[in-house]
Amino acid sequence: MSHDDPAANAAGAGPSRSPAPDPHAATPSWQWPEPVWRGHVEAVRAGRGLLPPRWPDGARVAVALSFDSDHETIPLRDGETSPGLLAQGEYGARKGAGRVLELLERYSAPATFFMPAVSALLHPDEARRYVREGHEVGVHGWIHERNTLLAAEDEKTLIRRALETLTDITGRTPTGIRTPSWDFSDSTLETVLDLGFLYDSSLMADDEPYEVVAHGRPTGLVEIPVDWIRDDAPYFTMDRFTALRPYTRPRDVLEIWRDEFDAAYRDGGVFQLTMHPHVIGHRSRLVILRELLDHVSGHRGVWFATHDQLAGTARDQLGRPTASNSPTEQP
Ligand SMILES: [Zn+2]
């Protein structure tokens, strides 16, 4: 939630419960029988690791950059219509996205832009430019809705509509989804599978891609894991009505991300990063993205991949015997 709405987290609003009836909802967790707590844990779980034995062209590391082009949808999602709040998001479209695209072009780095459909409808030329310049556009909800508050059917309707809208605007059918705020409702996984997505990029159970398992059943869905550590928003977001302020200097964030990359490089794994044009696109922050790309590009064997390309490579591992690609094996 906090990559776009840290105030809610800071205020103690934890993951919302699904409206689905739960006979144990009124029972405190310490009184749950084992099938209940075990059932919650096993509903959506990390399965086999999908790290390939080698990356394309003999690369040493896969670098998967992503940008969530939320723009105005964060306030809109909450029914906030004040021009002041909307302008903060508008900055992402007006200044941030273009700066990010110029930087990616300079480093010949394809990336993935997850875009709420309403954001794409507000900025259709931007969505088309992403595709035209060799990047991927992925689904990121309709209006950045809080999926855990929705009935299953409503959540599905919105994701389907988002998929159709992005396809209409860009001429490409998205293959991946990042759920708004990285949240999963009790029905999100089923919806993602029903709509035929190749991959999801919202969960955090590993550093490397893995197969999502539902109640013990492998689903074939590739997960490209994310984490708050590799997200710009938690470091830089501020809310004027709460104590929430940016608490890390941009150059300190650069150091964290560099360490993440260096370790991924040593492991022969994936360095995945999530940013937002309205957050990273400011002058004093874009400089750390440029310095990070300088650092990354200074290494031999870097494969800049869109999330779709990375998921395709990971999915190839599904057909291999489990023993040959255990999560601990390194290329
Ligand atoms: Zn978002």
Image (spheres, rainbow, N blue to C red):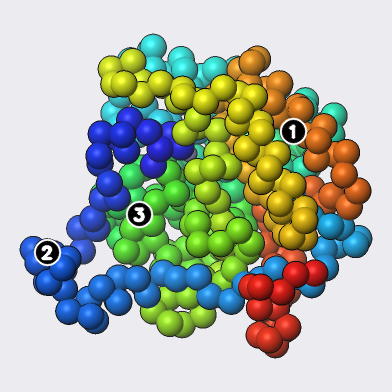
Q: Residue at x 22, y 76 (%)?
A: 36
- 317, above or below 66, in the image: below
Residue 258 lies, with reference to residue 38, above or below; the image says above
Label 3 packing within 10 angstroms: few (<14), some (14-19), many (20+)? many
Side of 286 where 165 appears, left or right = left
Q: Quadrant of residue 86?
A: top left
Say whether disc 3 or disc 1 marks the residue closer to the N-terminus: 3
Q: Position of residue 79 (x, y in %)?
A: 29, 28
| 10 Å crowding of disc 2: few (<14), some (14-19), many (20+) | few
How many circles with numbers are drawn on the protein?
Answer: 3
Left or right of 170 on screen, residue 166: left
- Does dot 3 land on a helix, a strand or a loop? helix
Figure quadrant of residue 53 = bottom right
Residue 29 x/y as whole percent = 17, 66
Looking at the image, can residue 94 be seen? Answer: yes
Q: Which residue is mark 1?
A: 292
User: Which quarter of the image is occupied by the N terminus?
Assistant: top left
Q: Residue at x 88, y 38 (%)?
A: 298
Task: Answer with left or right where residue 81 lies relative to residue 315.
Answer: left
| Residue 64 makes an appearance in the image | no
- Image quarter (top left, top right, bottom left or bottom right) of the C terminus: bottom right
Instruction: Calculate the distance from the C-alpha at mark 2 to the C-alpha at mark 1.
Output: 46 Å
Q: Which residue is mark 2?
A: 28
Task: For marks 3 and 2, give the one nearer the viewer.
Answer: 2
Structural distance between the alpha carbons of marks 3 and 1: 37 Å
**Which residue lies at the image location 85% right of the left edge and 29% below the top edge?**
106
Callout 3–callout 2 Cβ contact below 8 Å: no
